[in-house]
Image (spheres, rainbow, N blue to C red):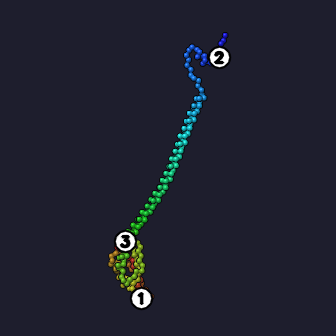
Amino acid sequence: MIRINLAPERGRRLRGAGFSFSLPAFNMAWLFGVVYLALLLGVGVTWWILISTKANLTADIDRAQKDLAALKAQIGQETKIKELANELRKRVDVIESITKAQGRPILMVEAFASVIPSDLWITGFEERGGQIKVAGSAFSATAVADFMSNLRASGKFKDVDLVVSRRDLARPSPLVTFEVTCRFEG
């Protein structure tokens, strides 16, 4: 006769006389659930790290752009200050050259005033390139001659020449109008 044992294998072994070792039954659904949760947790942590990194980088970029704008404004101010400083240097140079050259005309006028006779009037005085042109009137030609000799005798005027000398006879008291050129070397 054939016997068929329908009892589960586990039950059969316990009844058996020998010792046997077996692993507990493993459920694959639990394994996939745990792996799924671990992956979900890993993705969530990675996402959180990336979002916080993005926020930090965005804040750094904003700070850097503000600093850049402030530095550009500061550079613009420094450029304006340099331009103003250059302009001020030019102005100071012009003022210094004017004050240095200021003494010469004063010396020239003082030397010129000391040689004018009392019966002679200066009606025009012009200096160009070191050359002086003097126009005036006198009661006589002798006063004009005295004026020219005084210019030469002062030692400060050179190349004294009479350009024009006219007597105006139409007036009741005839005046001599003249024009003299010279150079000042004082």
Tell me how far mark 1 sits from mark 2, CA to CA: 170 Å
- Dot 3 surroundings within 10 Å: few (below 14), some, or many (20 or more)? few
Percent of width and height locating residue 109 = 37, 76
Percent of width and height locating residue 119 = 37, 84
N-terminal label among 3 and 1: 3
Q: Decide if residue 159 is in sight here.
A: no
Residue identified by numbered label 2: 6
Label 3 or label 1, whichever lies nearer to me, is 3
Q: Left or right: 96 with respect to 53?
A: left
Q: Amino acid at mark 3?
A: Gly
Residue identified by numbered label 1: 173
Q: Residue at x 41, y 87 (%)?
A: 174
N-terminal label among 3 and 2: 2
Residue identified by numbered label 3: 103
- Residue at far right of view: 1
Q: Is the C-beta separation of discs 3 and 2 under 8 Å?
A: no
Q: Quadrant of the N terminus?
A: top right
